[in-house]
Amino acid sequence: MIHIGLYNIAINIYVFLVWITSFKKLKAKQFIEGRVQLRQRINQALQSAHNQRIWVHCASLGEYEQALPVLQSLRNQYPQYIVILTFFSPSGYEVRKDTACAHYTFYLPTDAAHNAQWFLEEVRPTLAVFVKYDLWYHYLSTLHAKGIPIVLISAIFQKRQGYFKWYGVIQRKMLHMCSHIFVQDAASEQLLRQIGIQNTSVVGDTRFDRVIAASEKTQSLDIVVDFIKKPNILVAGSTWWPDETMLQALSQQLDESWQMIIVPHEVDRQHIDKLSELFGKEATTYSNYSLKGPYSKILVVDTIGKLIHIYRYATVVWVGGGFGKAGIHNVLEPAVFAKPCFFGPIYHQFIEANALIVANAAKEMHDFGQFYNFLSQSYAQSALEEMGKNAHAYVVSKGGATSHIMAYLAAKLDN
């Protein structure tokens, strides 16, 4: 019981700190305000929903991308069920609260015994699906007590995590409550075996299915088509300021056969103005682009939702984030389009980035000089084509996790 008491204290401290931060930070404010009168809103939304229900929970936007193939399959294969999606973070909820892949989308109430009790009384799920790692003790213990199956998908574990430390008693209990755990790799399964968990399957990451499906539905973008005037296009996706200053230096060295399309991670007005100043007259923004207008060397995309559609036009892709503590962003989206990927030195925590390097589909770059030297070599074109082929082959070889997960869920839902 002492472990649960300490867990409860930690949760309360976390909520208090978020509340303090909410006076200055928008995301913290959204976290607090999004949960005000949440029970009443959930009750009102669900009171006329009489079908059986499936609950899917994601921490944030990245986990939603992993959940998406399963959500879509559930909607398609089980139209008689109501799918309820929850998010812990505003970064997921505020962006995907209107998703068509769920009937209802809510914030998850903070983890407390009374919150778990009333939430599950309102939602009444037949099945609960958690994505990757966002597990909460009171929710899992209440589900477990009610005999509701708990499935964890796209999970990945490392020895440094609390699950495998002396102090991880609560975390291990949560894993033992899961009916089944679908892990991304064999190393994760082996770690779970060491703490006595046998109900596992190695099926890979559902994000591969997500990007494969998304690549088949990309749209042609008239502005991008008109912008492209040269044979070589460098697309830089989800960039941060260190990426962008590197790319500015690179743009001064590349010959006239190159153009750049930069899709920054932050598209607020202040940052876009900063980029316009950095790149000067050589750049134009997506929102200000004029079809058949004057030639521009650099296109700065100042709107969201375009990146995956733009990757198809690339000769080379720079994946942003590799100069910051959090590391690089999604490398699978460009890889599925058979594009060679390059990024900064902070990527080691992402298994797919490491795998692409091993497959000779991606390369680490420390500065613009190293990147320029590679692109300007006489063998670069053939090398890039080979890298692109390897990238596509890697992504395709890793697909199929969703079908394995759905086979398990079907056995639960069809009974």
Image (cartoon, rainbow, N blue to C red):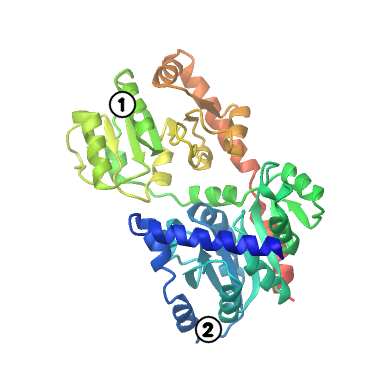
Residue 400: percent from left, percent from top:
66, 51
Looking at the rendered image, the quarter that the N terminus falls into is: bottom right
Q: Amino acid at mark 2?
A: Ala
Q: Is residue 274 visible?
A: yes
Q: Residue at x 40, y 17 (%)?
A: 369
Q: Residues within 10 Å of mark 2 (few under 14, many from 20)?
A: some
- In this view of the protein, which residue sits in the foreground, 227 or 318? 318
Residue behind mark 1: 248
- Which of disc 1 and disc 2 is earlier in sequence? 2
Q: Residue at x 32, y 17 (%)?
A: 253
Q: Is residue 207 shown above or below 311? A: below
Checking the image for residue 105, the label placed there is none
Residue behind mark 2: 49
Looking at the rendered image, the quarter that the C terminus falls into is: bottom right
Residue 231 in the figure: left or right of residue 296: right
Residue 107: percent from left, percent from top:
48, 67
Residue 189 in the figure: left or right of residue 31: right
Residue 334: percent from left, percent from top:
48, 39
Contact (Cβ within 8 Å) of mark 2 with mark 1: no
Q: Which of the 4 image quarters holds residue 406?
A: bottom right
Q: Residues within 10 Å of mark 1 (few under 14, many from 20)?
A: some
Q: Residue at x 48, y 73 (%)?
A: 104
- In this view of the protein, which residue sits in the foreground, 384 or 408? 408
- In this view of the protein, which residue sits in the foreground, 362 or 176? 176
The local secondary structure at tag 2 comes to loop
Q: CA distance from mark 2 to mark 1?
A: 54 Å
